[in-house]
Amino acid sequence: MSIGLFKQAILSLRQESRLAWGLYPRTPQRLNLWFKWLAPGLLVKRWLLLSAGGVLLTSLGVAIWVKLTPVYLLIQFIGDILEKITTVIPSYVSGPVVVIVGLFLIFLGQTRSLGSITEVLRPGGDEKLIDVLLAYRKLNRGPKIVAIGGGTGLSTLLRGLKDYSANITAIVTVADDGGSSGRLRREIGVLPPGDIRNCLAALADEEKLLTELFQYRFRAGDGLVGHSFGNLFLTAMSEITGDLEQAIAASSQVLAIRGLVLPATLCDVRLWAELADGRLIEGESSITEAGGQILKIGCIPPNPPAPPAALKAIHEADYIIIGPGSLYTSVIPNLLVPEIAEALASRQVPRIYVCNIMTQPGETTGYSVSDHIRAIDAACGQPLFSAVLVHKKSPSPHSLMRYAQENSYPVFLDREAVEHLGRRIVLANVMDEDRLTGLVRHNPQKLSRVLLRWYGGRGLRYSTKNSCLTMTIPDI
């Protein structure tokens, strides 16, 4: 749990204590909050009982140490007092009263102690402590998810997944050579930080101001125009630590991210593509700009090694998600690392590919769903996933006209070809459409809900050896 979340939790408990003493009106919702404390898995009740046991043992030890003499006299004195009280007030009344007073003092002491800590830390937020604890335990019990990709597609996916699990590992391409990342790569020689920055921001744990700072892009200044603060921060940390992994770890602490972000390789890789017209194009940004049909794609140097942490995450994963994102410049570059491809192929856990909603000019013009699958299989030499998630609802005519001007169209689902490739089809509405601009993107919340629903159902019941089927997930 991040420090900011911990501070919010303390403030929440202090506010709850005020409610308990009548500073605010009582409501049925307050009663529900107290019952939440009985929920299993909070790891609170057991420690309170353990503390109570420690108090009893300590008292017993002191009594044995002093040979019970003072304790005996004290017990006798208290007994005399209680006997006199019971002559005035019956025991069935005085007993419960004393118990209630004792519990009141315990509760008051606990809440006031946390209140004192609150005053020092001065936290913000008004979320209830019990809700914070329940959410924290739920996220940490979530499945171990590995998400592979790059660009805006992967960061969109992570923005939704972080609400369901804190055990997320994002494996991100480092083949970008355009924009701010490309400039830093050429001028300083660091691995491109742009996609990694986007994933870190997407996984940030409600640290809004820091996230905005990390994503801030300079609009003036010699040499600064176009650079984002996060890119410069990661570059500086890479220079200081000498390792992009350490730079990512430091940024992860600053942003208090849920999960882990790892580069697909620590090598300085450069993409190349062979086009149908015979051209050989080098550079990630140049491949898209070339505008030809891609026949083959690779990287220089060939067979780059994978970070051990990335391989470990794949071998321990409960669920593997590939995409969404640009097919040849965001998804496949990760799979050109042979160790990653082999690790993915060896796993018998649910593995799904999230297909793009629209074709991408210069990369996948005219591609169907099966064409996307064939391209990934060809690049890796083996199938890496058992199912493909396809958006089932067509965009509005306004969006279709907008994209048609760019020679981009919805990715056609050729069912028979996909099933012939041995993949199951998962159909669901996961699109987010901007009615004003006509832009079409995956919706983070819809996409993550569908993926987790499939994982909890069909994804766990069927292995790659089962017969193919189409599963349609209704709108959630």
Image (spheres, rainbow, N blue to C red):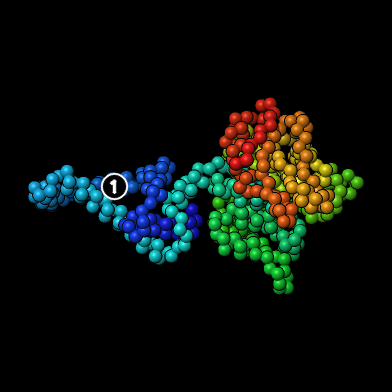
Report x, y in % for residue 436.
Answer: 72, 56
Q: On the rendered structure, is 78 left or right of 389?
A: left
Q: Residues within 10 Å of mark 1 (few under 14, many from 20)?
A: few
Q: Amino acid at mark 1?
A: Ala
Q: Which residue in the protein does label 1 denote?
A: 52
Report x, y in % for residue 48.
Answer: 33, 47
The quadrant of the rendering that contains the C terminus is: top right
Looking at the picture, tell me which residue is in the foreground, 125 or 173.
Answer: 125
The quarter of the displayed image where residue 187 is located: bottom right
Looking at the picture, tell me which residue is in the foreground, 25 or 383.
Answer: 25
Report x, y in % for residue 424.
Answer: 69, 32
Looking at the picture, tell me which residue is in the foreground, 238 or 420.
Answer: 420
Up/down of 474 relative to 223, above or below: above
Report x, y in % for residue 133.
Answer: 44, 49
Q: Residue furthest bottom?
A: 221
Residue drawn at (53%, 43%), measured in percent from left and top? 142
The answer to whether residue 216 is seen in the rendering is yes
The quarter of the displayed image where residue 323 is located: top right
Q: On the rendered structure, is 417 left or right of 124?
A: right
Residue drawn at (66%, 35%), measured in percent from left and top? 472
The answer to whether residue 361 is seen in the rendering is no
Looking at the picture, tell me which residue is in the foreground, 35 or 372.
Answer: 35
Q: On the rendered structure, is 75 left or right of 217?
A: left
Element assignment for label 1: helix
The quarter of the displayed image where residue 236 is located: bottom right
Residue drawn at (48%, 56%), measured in percent from left and top? 5
